[in-house]
Image (cartoon, helix red, strand yellow):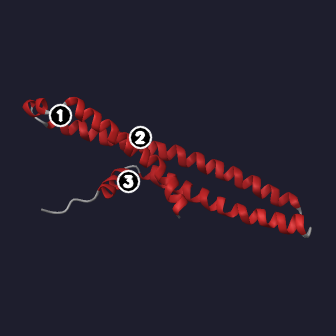
Amino acid sequence: MAAQPGWARRLAGYAWRHPRDVVLALGASLGGMAVTALVPLITKVIIDDVIGDHSRRMTPWAGALIAAALVVYVLTYIRRYYGGRLALDVQHDLRTEMYETITRLDGRRQDELSTGQVIGRATSDLQLIQGLLFMLPMTIGNVL
């Protein structure tokens, strides 16, 4: 019997059915983290060169901070929108496949199922998967 892929690999397969959402969510997350990492450098220049020894003007550096804030805002919006969309699309794919699997069972096998247990377990598991996929781009961005 061949070894089945782990849950993360299977979940990645479902996610890559929606490549645009994956790329936009992860790309926006990484871009936002990169800009956020640059903000302390801008602050250092403002403190050391603008306030400390007056060798630079404040206007361009204050503008750079405002621009960084706007870029992070836009990238955060993109990450949240496409990450949420990805999570809902994968959840829909999983629900559809689960429904198709149950409907392929013959009547006797369907009667043997405990409907409340199946629906309850499916709902809780799919909500956990949705939450994981929604937060995953931000987590990956933070780690990197």
Q: CA distance from mark 2 to mark 3?
A: 13 Å
Q: Which mark is residue 103?
A: 1
Residue at horizontal 12%, vertical 62%?
A: 1
Residues 39 and 96: in front is 39
**What amino acid does circle 1 point to?**
Thr
Q: CA distance from mark 1 to mark 2?
A: 22 Å
Q: Nearer the viewer, mark 2 or mark 3?
A: 2
Residue at horizontal 29%, vertical 33%?
A: 120
Q: CA distance from mark 3 to mark 1?
A: 26 Å
**Residue at numbered disc 3:** 16
Give percent across and percent down for residue 19.
42, 53
Residue at horizontal 60%, vertical 59%?
A: 33
Q: Nearer the viewer, mark 3 or mark 1?
A: 1
Give percent across and percent down for residue 25.
51, 51
Residue 84, above or below 49: above
Secondary-structure class at tag 2: helix
Give percent across and percent down for residue 110.
13, 32
Residue at horizontal 89%, vertical 67%?
A: 52
Secondary-structure class at tag 1: helix
Residue 120, above or below 51: above
**What amino acid does circle 2 point to?**
Leu
